[in-house]
Amino acid sequence: MTEAEKHVRRRARHRCEYCQLPQSASRLRHQIDHIIARQHGGGDALSNLALCCVHWK
Ligand SMILES: [Zn+2]
């Protein structure tokens, strides 16, 4: 896990940032999402990253 990923998981308190589902309530691991996708010019800055459950993928 990268430092950025750890930071995002901590910042989100291990909840999906879209629907607030706690990691502990999901059998599937939450993902790090690019709010603006890379192909649309989004970067890897922490402000462009969000923790999200698999339902949003
Ligand atoms: Zn979610």
Image (cartoon, rainbow, N blue to C red):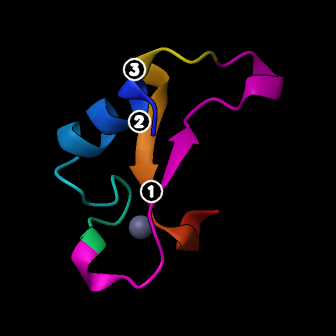
Circle 1: is it few (<14), some (14-19), or many (20+) Cα within 10 Å? many
Quadrant containing the C terminus in the rendered view:
bottom right
Q: Is the shortest distance between ligand 1 and the CB of mark 3 under 8 Å? A: no
Which disc is residue 5 wearing? 2
- The residue shown at (32%, 37%) is 6
Pointer 1: what residue? Answer: 52
Above or below 53: residue 7: above
Residue bearing the label numbered 3 = 47
Residue 21 in sight in this render: no
The local crowd at label 2, few if under 14, some if 14 to 19, many if 20 or more residues have their Cα within 10 Å, is: some
Ligand 1 position by quadrant: bottom left
* Residue 26 counted in the magenta span: yes
Disc 1 to disc 3, C-alpha distance = 14 Å
As drawn, is 43 to the left or to the right of 12?
right
Residue 14 location (% of width, % of height): 24, 56
Gap between marks 2 and 3, in whole Å? 12 Å
- Write the start and end of the magenta stretch as one range: 24-42
Number of the label disc, if any, that sits on residue 2: none
Q: Nearer the viewer, residue 7 or 55?
A: 7
Tell me the residue at 63%/29% (across/down): 36
Question: Where residue 43 appears, x then y in whole percent?
Answer: 62, 15
- Three-letter amino acid code at disc 1? Cys
Q: Of marks 1 and 2, which one's residue comes earlier in the chain?
A: 2
**Would you say the beta carbon of the disc 1 residue lies within 8 angstroms of ligand 1?**
yes
Secondary structure found at label 2? helix
Q: Residues within 10 Å of mark 3 (few under 14, many from 20)?
A: few
